[in-house]
């Protein structure tokens, strides 16, 4: 490569996002379900926030954590999907270097935050089932605020090195990203320096956040199931386990798409790129869509308030 071309990409002012390469002809049809899912995610999560804020009877630890999850879902989906839709609809593929780093930071920090909130919700279920008499003294408003702040700081701090590392690499190949957002791996692959430190940090972050979160969630549910199996009657066991169904469904909605996306990226060398990107997009859309539906259907207090809201409006 010539020196002039190399110089052009040392500090790229913009990147070009290709969206989903290989499916350009179908991008209008692809955009329809993505737009519908994003609309459902926004309306569903705002509805959760509105109902919890309006109903003082829902001002408790479980619903505070649910509001944190709703805010995280909104930021996660809004960080990626609108740009994807603008590529599909308006061919708006350019993104500035600074905007690219900002998008990368928000996606990485809030994905870690979402996982941390699920750990907090698992702890909430553990205390409610294994220590019900101490629930109100352990999970006070102050404790919930401190847990939320800890999750925010952990995710925000661990995501900070990513944009700084990306900024320090020289870019001498191209500024074209075959993706619909500025993913960390997709961007550093464009660098022409030794990017092993970025790869190593990515693995460290994966194990220190997601790995530890899965471990703590597993431990919580091991203790919860132990307590449930020691309840005296079958009805009591089923009723108690029923209070965990929403949270278990929320965990599956987050981790299953992430698991398959990671698995395909590492071992699916013959998998078409467009299929990999579609799977990745589900990771950013499915949880924000499914979480309000899961909690709206499974949580009696929210379901009742939602029905009251609609019946009051139409009477």
Image: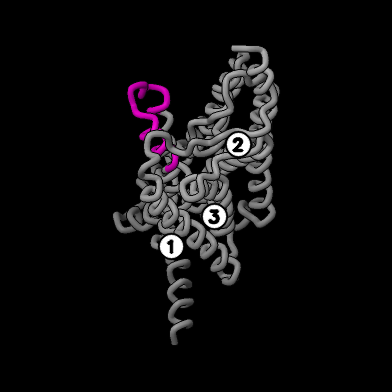
**Residue in the image at 39% along x and 30% along y:** 273
In the depicted view, which residue is nearer to us: 54 or 82?
82
Of callouts 2 and 1, which one flags the residue occurring earlier in the amino acid sequence?
2
Q: Residues within 10 Å of mark 3 (few under 14, many from 20)?
A: many
Question: How many neighbours does mark 2 have within 10 angstroms: few (below 14), some (14-19), or many (20 or more)?
Answer: many
At which x and y percent is residue 306? 46, 71
Compared with residue 141, is residue 263 higher up or lower down, i.e. above or below?
above
From the viewer's perspective, tell me whether residue 191 is left or right of residue 29.
Answer: right
Give the numbered dot on residue 70: 3
How far is mark 2 from mark 1, CA to CA? 30 Å
Mark 3 or mark 1, which has the lower sequence index?
3
Q: CA distance from mark 3 to mark 2?
A: 20 Å
In this rendered view, identify the residue nearer to me: 66 or 108: 108
* Residue 236 location, quadrant: bottom left
Q: Which residue is mark 1?
A: 296
Crowding near the residue tagged with mark 1, few <14, some 14–19, many ≥20 C-alpha atoms within 10 Å: many
Q: Tell us which disc is closer to us: 2 or 1.
A: 2
* Percent of width and height locating residue 303: 43, 68
Q: Earlier in the sequence, mark 3 or mark 2?
A: 3
Relative to 152, 242 lies left or right: left
Q: Is residue 229 visible?
A: yes
Residue 271 highlighted magenta (yes or no): yes
Q: Quadrant of the N terminus?
A: top right
Occupied quadrant, residue 295: bottom left
């Amino acid at each position: 490569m010539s020196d002039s071309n190399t110089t052009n990409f040392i500090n790229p002012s913009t990147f070009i996002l290709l969206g989903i390469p290989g499916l350009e002809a179908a991008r209008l049809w692809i955009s329809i379900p993505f737009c519908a899912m994003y609309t459902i995610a926004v309306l569903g999560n705002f509805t959760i926030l509105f109902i919890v804020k309006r109903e003082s009877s829902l001002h408790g630890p479980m619903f505070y954590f649910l509001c944190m999850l709703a805010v995280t879902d909104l930021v996660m989906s809004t960080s990626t999907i609108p740009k994807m839709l603008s590529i599909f609809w308006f061919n708006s593929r350019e993104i500035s270097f600074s905007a690219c780093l900002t998008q990368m930071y928000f996606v990485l920090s809030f994905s870690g935050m979402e996982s941390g909130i699920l750990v907090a919700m698992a702890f909430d279920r553990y205390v409610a089932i294994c220590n019900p008499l101490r629930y109100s003294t352990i999970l006070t408003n102050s404790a919930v605020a401190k847990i939320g702040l800890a999750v925010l700081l952990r995710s925000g701090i661990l995501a900070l090195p990513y944009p700084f590392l990306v900024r320090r690499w020289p870019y001498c190949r191209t500024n074209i990203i075959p993706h619909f957002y500025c993913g960390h791996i997709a961007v550093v692959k464009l660098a022409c320096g030794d990017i092993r430190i970025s790869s190593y940090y990515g693995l460290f972050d994966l194990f220190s956040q997601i790995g530890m979160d899965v471990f703590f969630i597993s431990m919580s549910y091991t203790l919860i199931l132990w307590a449930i199996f020691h309840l005296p009657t079958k009805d009591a066991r089923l009723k108690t386990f029923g209070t965990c169904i929403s949270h278990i469904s929320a965990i599956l909605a987050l981790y299953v798409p992430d698991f398959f996306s990671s698995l395909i990226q590492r071992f699916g060398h013959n998998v078409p790129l467009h299929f990999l990107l579609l799977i990745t997009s589900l990771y950013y859309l499915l949880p924000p869509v499914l979480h309000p539906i899961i909690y709206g259907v499974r949580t009696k207090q929210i379901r009742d308030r939602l029905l009251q809201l609609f019946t009051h409006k139409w009477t």
